[in-house]
Image: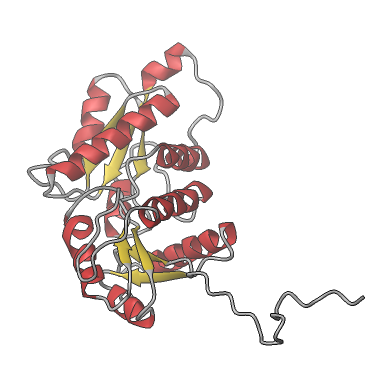
Amino acid sequence: MTPSNPLHHASGSTYRDTRPRRPALVLVAHGSRDPRALTTVTALAERVREQRPDLVVRLGHIELNEPLLTDTLDTLAHEAAVLVPLLLGRGQHVKRDIPDAAADAVAVDTRVAAALGPHPLLADALHARLVQAGWPARAMSARERRRHAVVLAAAGSRDPESAADTESAAALLADRIGVPVVPAYAAPTAACARTVPQALDILAAQGRTRAAVASYFTAPGRFAAQSAAAAPWLAAAPLGAHPALARLVLHRYDQARTTPAPVRGRRLSGV
């Protein structure tokens, strides 16, 4: 007997899968005039697709690059979407700008995930970038650890919670590599006052003659280049399309996707 076709009911009509589609994942990048930034976040989007091939992945920018977030959301009209900020801490973009764009979109169910950081996966990626730049890959002796340190260079924000997130990220990296990690900022504010050169001076005064700069940026840009230029020894590349970053993007997506459904027209903050 010929087995029945699972795509047909007994009546002979074609079967249609009516299960709800998984929400699209929209990567929300800041945008930069540096052409390498768009190349980098596009590569990250592709790595996310590789890790989850059945997921619709889109890219949108807050400013400076196309596609803009609003345009990307327009292409997903009347579909569900989860917006994952490619931003490393809480600040105006994460708290206000991205949720406002989500609330204005015509998607049926638009959610906003939490910022990427702080998270241990970022510490893994930061360590990998440091090793690529020349940081010792082997375990260091106690004498070597007394000479080594890292400045975690971030953009900076007026929001104290953003500064707290960077402090937490620095602590995670310090636990990961076993030497002091001092957070510093390319665009200092009242909340994020310490500059990268100031942090390097502090470490030099402590006898930390091997001070590296870790780039706490998702992609190349003006602030990342400015921070790297201050390094007296070595400077790591931005996080970029590191596999750990792609895994973290999917983790934030899953967190936001499984929260209770939001009320239409209101924003749902990530967890």
Residue 2 or residue 254, whichever sits in front = 2
- Residue 108 x %, y %: 32, 74
* Above or below: residue 79 compared with residue 87: below
Q: Residue furthest top?
A: 142
- Residue 14 x %, y %: 66, 85
Residue shown at the point (67%, 87%) measured from the top left: 13
- Residue 115 x %, y %: 30, 51
Q: Which of the 4 quarters of the picture holds residue 165?
A: top left
Look at the image and name its color scheme.
Answer: secondary structure
Answer whether residue 231 is visible to the viewer in this image: yes
Residue shown at the point (42%, 41%) measured from the top left: 126
Answer whether residue 66 is visible to the viewer in this image: no
Q: Residue furthest left?
A: 190
* Above or below: residue 240 compared with residue 136: below
Residue 249 or residue 260, whichever sits in front = 260
Residue 127 or residue 88, whichever sits in front = 88
Numbered-mark total: 0
177 relative to 64 in the view: left or right: right
* Above or below: residue 95 compared with residue 9: above
Residue 2 or residue 248, whichever sits in front = 2
Residue shown at the point (24%, 50%) measured from the top left: 155
Which quadrant is home to the N terminus? bottom right
Q: Which of the 4 quarters of the picture holds residue 213?
A: top left
